[in-house]
Image (cartoon, helix red, strand yellow):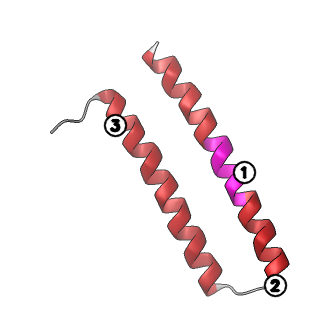
């Protein structure tokens, strides 16, 4: 209803991030392992999500320009 092309990109980004967080949470619950290894995986996942979001934001800015 109020979606513009710019808003669709933001919606996709947030959907991806929320999906990633839900998936990570389920993975932690369903595949128990040592706390040290789990913390390392969380840090790695957070780094990956940060990199993806940064790249996506750059691409979105280029499209808008």
Sequence order check, earlier mark of 2 and 3: 3
Residue that badge 2 annotates = 34
Mark 1 nearby-residue class (10 Å; few <14, some 14–19, many ≥20)? few
Disc assigned to residue 47:
1
Q: In the image, residue 6 lies at what x, y percent?
A: 35, 28
Q: Residue at x 58, y 26 (%)?
A: 58
Q: In this image, 39 relative to 6: left or right? A: right
Which SS class for mark 1?
Answer: helix
Seen at 54% across and 69% down, the residue is 23
Q: Nearer the viewer, mark 2 or mark 3?
A: 2
Quarter of the rendering containing residue 4: top left
**First in residue order: circle 1 vs circle 2:** 2
Q: Which residue is mark 3?
A: 8
- Secondary structure at numbered mark 3: helix
Number of numbered discs visible in the structure rendering: 3
- Residue 18 falls left or right of residue 37: left
Look at discs 1 and 3 and give the one toward the viewer: 1
Q: Residue at x 52, y 18 (%)?
A: 62
Point out residue 26 in the picture as x, y percentages from the top left corner. Answer: 55, 77
Please give the range of residues in magenta. Answer: 45-52
Q: Position of residue 39 (x, y in %)?
A: 77, 71
Which quarter of the rendered picture does the N terminus lie within?
top left
Residue farthest toward the right in the current orientation of the protein: 36
Query: Along the horizontal axis of the image, is 60 left or right of 8?
Result: right
């Amino acid at each position: 209803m109020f979606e513009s092309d710019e808003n669709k990109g933001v919606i996709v980004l947030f959907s991806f991030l929320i999906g990633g967080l839900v998936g990570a949470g389920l993975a932690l619950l369903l595949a128990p392992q040592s706390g040290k290894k789990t913390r390392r995986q969380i840090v790695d996942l957070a780094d990956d999500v940060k990199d993806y979001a940064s790249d996506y934001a750059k691409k979105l800015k280029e499209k808008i320009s």
